[in-house]
Amino acid sequence: MRILPNPRSSPVTGADTDRSPAVVLNLSAVFVLGVAVFFLLRARALPAGAGFVAMLFGFFLASTGAAGPINRGVAAFITALSDLTL
């Protein structure tokens, strides 16, 4: 008699993998922030002048020494969010 492994179990852990796979969603931070600014401008919650100043501030901030730590901080935050289980 030969015992066959459960086809639904993981070969490494032996755990049942009947759950549906996690959904992976990749979005650019620039896209997400751009959409947020668009809707703030559209809802008139952010005046056009303030939106333009915020855009210029982000543009010039990206060329300073603060860009590296800000990018690492945002990446750490996104990694922490992706490690959360619901």
Image: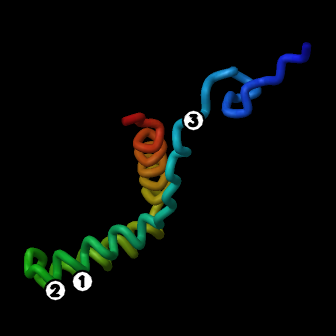
Q: Position of residue 59 (x, y in %)?
A: 39, 75
Task: Tell me the tag on residue 48.
Answer: 2
Residue drawn 78% across and 24% down?
A: 5
> Residue beneath label 3, please?
18
- What kind of element bears circle 1? helix
Residue type at tag 1: Phe
The quadrant in which residue 58 appears is: bottom left
* Three-letter amino acid code at the position of disc 2: Ala
> What SS does tag 3 mark?
loop
Image coords of residue 1 (percent x, y): 91, 13
Q: Residues within 10 Å of mark 2 (few under 14, many from 20)?
A: some
Which residue is denoted by mark 1 in the rendering?
A: 52
Instruction: Give the left or right position of residue 71, taking residue 60 as reference.
Output: right
Instruction: Report if the CB atoms under discs 2 and 3 are less than 8 Å apart.
Output: no
Instruction: Point out the frontmost of discs 3 and 1.
Output: 3
Dot placed on the residue nearer the N-terminal end, 2 or 3: 3
In the rendering, at what x and y percent does residue 39 appear? 20, 77
Looking at the image, the residue that sits furthest to the left is: 44
Image quadrant holding the C terminus, namely top left
Q: Nearer the viewer, residue 14 or 23?
A: 14
Residue 17 horizontal/vertical position (percent): 61, 33
**Amino acid residing under circle 3:** Asp
Horizontal side of 42 relative to 5 (left or right) equals left
Direction right: furthest residue = 1
Q: In which image quadrant can residue 53 be found?
A: bottom left
Residue 57 placement, left or right of 65: left
x 26%, y 71%: residue: 36
Q: CA distance from mark 3 to mark 1?
A: 50 Å
What residue is shown at x 31% (from left), y 72% (from top)?
A: 57
* Dot 3 or dot 1, earlier in sequence: 3
